[in-house]
Image: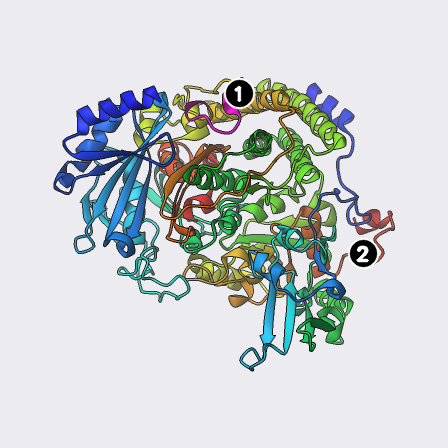
Amino acid sequence: MLKILKRALTIGVATSPYPASIPEPPEGLRGKPVIDFARCTACDTCAAACPTQAITVETENASVPGGPGAKHLSINYGHCIFCGECEAACPEAIHLTQEFELATARKSALTTRARFTVNREGIFILVGVEAQETSAGETLEDVGMQLREKVRQRLGRSLHIREVDAGSCNGCEVEISALNNPVHDIERFGIHFVASPRHADMLLVTGPVTRNMEIALRQTYEATPDPKLVVAVGACAIGGGIFGKSYASCGGVDTTVPVDVYIPGCPPRPEALLHGILLAIGRYPEKKKSTSMIDREV
Amino acid sequence: MNRTHDYIALLTESLGDRVTIREGTATNEVYLTLRQEALSVLPDTCALLTESLGAHFTTLVANDERTLNGRLSLYYVFSVPAKDLFVILQVPVDPRHMEVPSISPTLESANWFEREVKDGFGIIAFPNISPLASHPDWPEDVHPMLKDVDLKRPVPRVRGRFDFKHVEGEGVFEIPVGPVHAGIIEPGHFRFSVAGEPIINLDVQLFYTHKGTEKMAEGMDPQRAVFLAERVSGDSSFAHALAFCHALERLSGAEIPQRAVMIRTILLELERLYNHVGDVGAILLDVGYAVGAAAAAELKERLLHLNELLTGSRLLRSLAVFGGVRRDPEETASRRQMLRETLGQVERSFGDLVELVMSSSSVVDRLEGTGVLRRTDAERLGATGIVGRASGIDRDFRRDHPHCAYPYLQFTVASHDEGDVLARMQVRIDEVRQSFMMLEQMHHQHLGEAILAQRVEIPPLRQALGYVEGWRGDIVHWVMTDKSGNIFRWKVTDPSFRNWRALTVAVQNNIVPDFPVINKSFNLSYSGNDR
């Protein structure tokens, strides 16, 4: 007992200040890949290098004689496994940033699309980039506000989460478990992981939804009392990830149950998970720099 | 080389009348092909290999080779630790008569392998026919691993019920658990039969996380399939990816730069560290020792954070690649220093933690004598890795089938005889200490700059094993390339597949409330098992 007491007195605080302030991400962190479309020649190299078809190229009028008239290059962060193959294939125009807070309530916001047309020399010229975040007229904050209202009114400030592995590789579980460690300590927000869907306000779902988990996931969803939130964690849960759609995989959580928030990553690091969960309940602080935020939140 | 030849001579002498012998592409693989007329002595041949020739059953690979030679094949893979050899017994299967005699009656560790082959390929190992991978709503005549079954085509559901072993008698109850469990863990269904508190029988239904991973790789560029291998089991991302790369390198004869070999070894040990430290904490959590659990969780987080600092990925992803590694985690002086400092701190803190835990009789009492897996059962069921080593099976691929930089490192293989939860925790504690020692030996070794081999073509129609000792145990991959050098067949064997049955035996006669801690002490992968 005395040894334990001594430990407790000497060890100090291990908990990270996130999200009140964001700890400096490590230099090699592979976050959101960004394509500099101004330098892009629509050559397809990145799309060919991408193992999960997060980067795709569509060609318009491919059947017209004289070659393609236009190309669309899309990057979908929801499908991205952050491997860095695109950057290696095209260091001129693609760069993996350190941005990891990528969660969103709208799936379409995960895609950025650029249109290229071909000129007389056969070179593709950038026409425009549609970053979907702003195109639909509804901003992330709007969606966040709506959710915040919905959840705040009905669930209050304490959230209970049931984690459901719908066929993941266990990578996401490693990171979700890390939310319970003293460093990330999700309980400081009044958020608890519970043992039954009947006790839960939120389902945190990982995996591509395998054929063998499809029914179990649906039943778990039905067993969760309303109002409820569903958060899809990781590339598999968002769109099947590297496993896609097959005899064994449905290809994403929203094929089976409605999803409120998507958290990209393979797997998302704990801070990215916290970001997504807090976003879902409208508690992600808008001014990240305020260091007093944690105290107020708790 | 001599040892290999001696052993082949021995094989010829004992089995020459029923098999033809050829050497594999990789130098420590010997392929035996069973003659058609000798099919009835297959079980006897396997028994001879294990009982008289020092071989241990490792995995069973089925392969639909109809497009190549008009038949299917079964490959029974045995490890011969004393000779650093793999004996692979090939049994041709006629597509019009997809049946072979089961080897399970003499070699029980093959039981699940045979049943998985039946579900995947429709090859019956008579009379071992009950489904394993196929769930009851799966149509009986659909065998997804056959080449003529389309990966993308959905399979209709049929009506069916799980067939569990029923225990009847006064006061006997069944407790169904899962597939959605209470903790943050993977899905599987457990069916306990209990009389009061003690567990009489445990049946498991797995394959809830089956993602068709092996089939998906077929026809894929092997370099790309590495990303798939990384996602066989998330907590063994690097080990699986590396085992797969080893298979490719062995079948193509690629020479890996020394520096890359060293980095791979460092990464394997870093993966072992974070998992072992985390497991010690998880065991403590399940016996209610919150102080120790929190301390271990904090150490695990520090190790995961170190991984991210060194490599950009907490789970060591996107590092293994055919021919070497993508990044050097010790690239800069500051990273080298960070690695050394963090490991030093974690080593000290872990030492303090172990001392604290082992001096707490309330913890030790709960772990001692709980969930005993006896050596005879462990041997019989083919238990491997930390589970096997905690039950007195002194085998470790790092020593027995030297790979990576292990032949150049000094370490001892942890082994305990008690087979209880405490022994499984003790094996982990010992291995953590060995890992720190090995990492110290590997610290900043100057072995040249190259971390990637010269480009080597992956040859067509070759097959080879690739293996590593992951943190759970030996991970064995078998890869065969097609005519254009893409994947024809990829078989993944995670140690979990060989240990699940041992868990069901270890829990017998224990009380239900001890199940979580017993389960945690095994910490088997569902995804690695189900793929």
The amino acid pointed to by label 1 is Tyr
Which sits in the foreground, B345 or B501? Answer: B345
Q: Secondary structure at mark 2?
A: loop
- Mark 2 crowdedness (10 Å alpha carbons): few <14, some 14-19, many ≥20: some
Residue B15: % across, % down: 18, 29
Q: Please give the range of residues in magenta.
A: B399-409
Report the chain holding disc 1: B
Q: Report the side of B220 relative to A201 (left or right).
A: left
Q: Report the side of B59 relative to A248 (left or right).
A: left
Q: Secondary structure at mark 1?
A: helix
Residue at mark 2: A285
Residue A271: % across, % down: 71, 48
For image coordinates 35% across by 27% down, the residue present is B85
Residue at mark 1: B408
Residue B59 visible within the image? yes
For image coordinates 70% across by 43% down, the residue present is A185
Placement of B185 over or under A136, stated as above or below: above
Placement of B120 over or under A259, stated as above or below: above
Furthest residue toward bottom: A64
Q: Report the side of A68 relative to B387 (left or right).
A: right
Residue B365 visible within the image? no
Label annotation for residue A6: none
For image coordinates 51% across by 59% down, the residue present is A220
Which sits in the foreground, B206 or A156? Answer: B206
Residue B383: % across, % down: 37, 31
